[in-house]
Amino acid sequence: MAQPSLTEDELNDALGLAIRAANTAAFIINAVDERKNNIAETQTRMDTNDIVSQREKQCREEVLNILRVGTPLYAILIDETHGETVLGDGPTWMVSPIDDSISCAHGLFDFSVSIALALRKEPVLGVVCAPRLQEVFTAVKNRGAFSNGQRIHVSRVNSLKQSVVLLNQSCNRSDAAVKAMTAIQSELAKLPVEGLWCNGSTALGMCLVAAGRAELFWEAGVNPWNVAAGVIIVREAGGVVHDVDRIDSFDLTRRGVCCGCSLDVTKHGVELSLKHDYCRSVLNASP
């Protein structure tokens, strides 16, 4: 049986569709910001969170509609409906309408709209839109990576001590997971690295690596729709992507990702993860 494939024209159409869907979601989110700015100070955080939740649902519906109408034969894997779709070899959209809704609700910048297209279980196209940064990252396999239309490339740094490291806090707050995370953070702080930062959106964190603004990012407990767009963007920017606990493979379904400007840098993430049993500690009780 012939392997599924996509023509260059189909990739072009898919890229345009993904950008339109991401920009539509960003427009909805920006409307939330305007509405929140008009909320009286007497209203609670719950009120504003409810507004964000409503808009997240609206983003999901709008993105799904655009993708379904534009590519009716493609599968779609999206955050809250993933049980309905299995990642297969055919063209599959992977979508996180608001990647890190907590940052979105709190008025922070580090969230994104993340849309990827995978073929044979590998991302071939990615779009990550950061509404509050007014920045859209894009990549198509073998065409390079871009931010707002400008070519981007990973950092040339090869030393961990000169690196900015992004290490996300897992949603799993079990004793084992917290212990592993704090042990890793402690070692990085003592090196010391150039900077250590806990980012919100997985996809945006990976894009910051792709753009050369950070050198290393890793996180366990993530899902395919959180990382797929970031994977192709980092790779097309000249970076490396692999599993959290090994440098010679990457599987979207293993719920972890480590990426960076070079293996000389990312190998330290793997070493620390293995030393402190990070991946197993997070995944054993991860929601």
Image (cartoon, grey):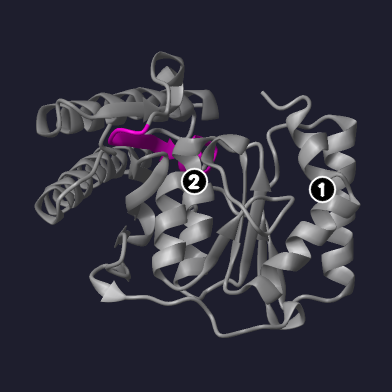
Magenta stretch containing residue 125, yes or no? no
Please tell me whether mark 2 sits on a helix, a strand or a loop.
helix
Q: Is residue 200 left or right of residue 211?
A: right
- Disc 1/disc 2 C-alpha distance (Å): 20 Å
Q: Amino acid at mark 1?
A: Met
Q: Quadrant of residue 255?
A: top right
Q: How many marks?
A: 2
Looking at the image, which residue is at 49% across and 46% down? Answer: 227
> CB of mark 1 within 8 Å of CB of mark 2?
no
Residue 102 magenta-highlighted: yes
Rendering coords of residue 147 (x, y %): 32, 68
Q: Position of residue 265 (x, y in %)?
A: 69, 73
Q: Which mark is residue 132?
A: none
Q: Secondary structure at mark 1?
A: helix
Numbered circle sitting on residue 227: 2
- Closer to the camera, 238 or 42? 238
Q: Residue at x 49, y 65 (%)?
A: 208
Q: Which residues are magenta?
A: 89-105
Where is residue 239 shown, x and y percent of the image? 51, 70
Q: Say which amino acid is labelled 2.
A: Val
Direction from residue 12 to residue 246 in the image, left or right: right
Q: Please name the residue shown 33% across and 42% down the image.
A: 119
Residue bearing the label numbered 1 = 181
Q: Residue furthest front?
A: 1
